[in-house]
Image (tube, coloured by chain):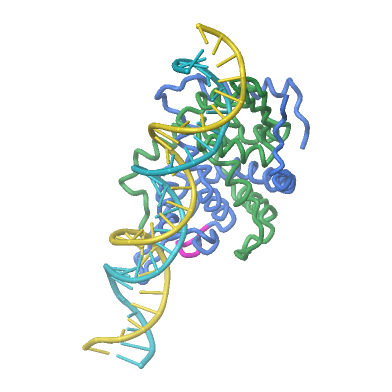
Chain colours: A blue, B green, C cyan, D yellow
DNA sequence: AGAGTAAGTTACAAAAAGTTACTTATATAA
DNA sequence: TTATATAAGTAACTTTTTGTAACTTACTCT
């Protein structure tokens, strides 16, 4: 992990300001970070998008196996929301038994590329994070 | 949003596989995406990290105002977890009334840079997402 | 003595998520 | 000709997580 210079920090702060618009607006102004990210960065959404990035097409029960631990209910809900926001497509084949296939849209693939940069970083540094976490308990708080 | 080529998709799939290790491991193997990302990509954590990237030092009640809508309880919990994982530092000044300052660590700044790439993308395309969302209701499901 | 302040904590209510059983439509086996 | 099986969900109920609002602590200033 590269140490970050003061210059870099200033550059980052400017990017944040630009992104938020009015950073200090606590009024009821629409905030995409809160709205859109709530779904996009959700723990189950991330896994769904990653698995669909690896297996280009997955059926409902296949997804349920890959994204192990997710319930029917939550998988169904997240898929509806991700479809509505345009990350993935749902194709219904009215056979018996029914067949439904989920696939990333171009937009979903575009999102996946950005998401992957973040998850790769997290994977790369997870050892450091876990080491930090172990030390905790003995609080790291400084006192003056 | 640039359309993604088949080659790109293959490249992405390879990165995902590498990241996950065994992509198909649904056993009890440790998965940093599930563990570490659960906190790092949490909706409140994201806002806390972004605001600390803009205002380098914030006290508890200042953070509560910036990250408007968060409760004492959840702010307190998230701060503890983010401190434990090494994203931020807590400094206690035993004055009266007490003063506590939160600040990103170098590790936190490093994470912020990656996070910012993602939130910038989301902000940039939030109009598209919202337009998608409006069309929904009339389901976008294809049928064959 | 009494009020005020920052940083939380605590007890309780509300919302979200997880669990398990059920539904639907039809082909195939008994 | 019932009975069974299957995929993709949905529905009713339980558990967990989150949010709300009041309280605590430790001192200083009026």
**How many numbered marks, from 0 up?**
0
Residue B140 horizontal/vertical position (percent): 36, 49
Residue A6 in view, yes or no: yes
Q: Is residue B52 above or below residue B41?
A: above
Q: Is residue A59 magenta?
A: yes
Residue A91 coordinates in the image, percent (x, y):
40, 57
Name the one closer to the observer, D19 or B114. Answer: D19
Decide: is A25 above or below B67. Answer: above
| Residue at image location 60% in from the left, 64% down from the top | B26
**Above/below status of A58 relative to B58:** below
Image point (51%, 49%), residue name: A45
Q: In the orientation shown, which residue stands out farthest toward the right?
A: A2
> Which of the 4 image quarters holds residue B103?
top right
Who's the residue at 54% across and 56% down the image? A56
Q: Nearer the viewer, residue B103 or B29?
A: B103
A108 left or right of B110?
Answer: left
- The residue lying at 63 percent from left, 38 percent from top is B82
A132 over D25 or under it: above or below:
below
Indicate the position of residue A127 as horizontal and vertical percent values: 74, 48
Q: Quadrant of the C terminus of chain B?
A: bottom left
The image shows residue A66 at horizontal and vertical percentages of 55, 61
Q: Which quadrant would residue B135 be assigned to in this image? A: top left
Q: Nearer the viewer, residue B116 or D14?
A: D14
Residue A14 visible in the picture: no
Is-magenta flag for residue A30?
Answer: no
> In screen coordinates, is A121 left or right of A57?
right
Q: Which residues, given as a range, are shown in magenta?
A: A57-62
The one of B49 and A44 positioned closer to us in this rendering: B49
């Amino acid at each position: 992990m590269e140490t970050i210079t003061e210059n870099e920090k200033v550059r980052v702060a400017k990017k944040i300001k630009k992104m938020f618009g009015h950073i200090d607006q606590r009024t009821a102004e629409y905030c995409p970070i809160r709205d859109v990210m709530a779904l996009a960065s959700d723990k189950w959404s991330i896994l769904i998008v990653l698995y669909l990035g690896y297996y280009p097409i997955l059926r409902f029960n296949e997804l349920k196996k890959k994204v192990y631990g997710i319930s029917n209910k939550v998988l169904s809900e997240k898929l509806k929301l991700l479809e509505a926001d345009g990350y993935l497509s749902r194709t219904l084949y009215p056979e018996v038994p029914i067949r439904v296939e989920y696939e990333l849209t171009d937009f979903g693939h575009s999102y996946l590329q950005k998401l992957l940069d973040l998850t790769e970083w997290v994977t790369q540094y997870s050892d450091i994070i876990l080491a930090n976490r172990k030390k905790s308990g003995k609080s790291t708080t400084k006192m003056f």
